[in-house]
Amino acid sequence: MGPGDLSEALCGLPLLTDGNVLRGMESLDDAGVYKINEELAIIQTVDFFTPIVDDPYSFGQIAVANALSDVYTMGGRPLTALNIVCFPTKSLDISILKAILQGGVDKMREAGVILLGGHSVDDVELKYGLAVTGTVHPKRLITNSGALPGDKLVLTKPLGTGIISTAIKAGEASKETIGKVTRCMAALNKQACELMQELGAHACTDITGFGFIGHAIQLADNSQVGIRVDSVKVPVFEEAKEFISKGLCPGGLYRNREFYGGRVKFLANTPEFLQDVLFDPQTSGGLLISLSAEAAVALVSRLEIAGVEDAAIVGEVVSEPKGKILVA
């Protein structure tokens, strides 16, 4: 499903209203948030997908990191999870499922998340993911609606995972490249979440299926601002350029470009391959965090000390034109 399909599907649904809903479907935020009382709100999200790497254990790790990311994006702490499993029992050995679930459990343990159970179905196509519940103080909730003109934008993971995943499926990626991108996708956004809270982030989103451009536009729309991106500063997997030259781009990249392309302007000095990368749908991507210039510098420095070495200041928030992206 592409971004246009999602918007059309959501349009016109008879949504129930409740004063305790802090973030719901209408905001297209990263998760739903419901206030329990003045000091506690719960964050709920669900995400699952088909394998993007061949190793079952690694796939489990990536799927869990990806699902937990929506809670981290909103400044929350994930607490519990439910497994969602679709498994073709007639064509795959059950040992594959066990490896996937072990990878997931190990990643949940790293995050301090408790697995409460889940649901499985026999399906012709393998899928795995989680429904996650987390918590946040209502006054410390971070959404995709608070970016302010003058803010800097920090991206915490490199782009290009969709392109590289396509190369993996085509048998074109080396073991070294597979290992590198797998480690990145399996890495939790926990440290970035904790640090952005400490440094007073104004807004945040994570970069996933709609690509950098799509998620940045959602942030700009909800915050009623524009965004200027410094193409030289954007962290990218270097292998992505080679795979783009071979035509190894996922279908989601073209759908994202078709839907969001009219809202972004690329200046002449923007490398052509980077234009593709910015539309590339990511799996378990990094956080895109909007915060003051001083706090942004501190965030990148502290993330580097914490071992998040690819984090970088990639742009800034501007007043106009609202809802548009300029890539220079």
Image (cartoon, rainbow, N blue to C red):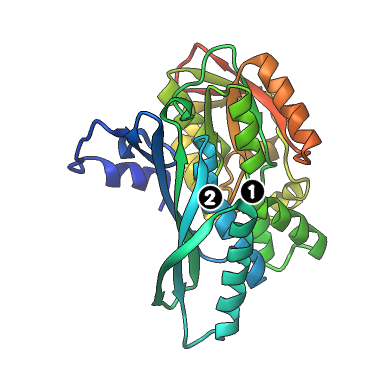
Taking depth in this image into account, of 257 and 226 the one nearest to the observer is: 226
Quarter containing the C terminus = top right
Earlier-in-chain disc, 2 versus 1: 2
Left or right of residue 317, residue 19 in this image: left
Does the residue at mark 2 contact the one at mark 1 (Cβ under 8 Å)? yes
Taking depth in this image into account, of 286 and 241 the one nearest to the observer is: 286
In space, the residues marked 2 and 1 are separated at their CA atoms by 8 Å
Left or right of residue 134, residue 167 in this image: right
Q: Of helix, strand and loop, which one carries label 1?
A: loop
The quadrant in which residue 303 appears is: top right
* Residue 254 position in % (x across, y down): 52, 47
* Residue 55 position in % (x across, y down): 67, 71
The quadrant in which residue 300 appears is: top right
Using a 10 Å C-alpha cutoff, classify the residue at mark 1 as few (fewer than 14 neighbours), some (14 to 19) or many (20 or more).
many
* Residue 185 position in % (x across, y down): 65, 53
Q: Answer above or below: position of 171 versus 308.
A: below
- Mark number displayed over residue 230: none
Residue 304 appears in the rendering: yes
Question: Residue at the location (73% across, 22% down)?
Answer: 298
Amino acid type indicated by mark 2 = Leu
Residue located beneath label 2 in the image: 68
- Mark number displayed over residue 188: 1
Question: Residue at the location (62% across, 59% down)?
Answer: 109
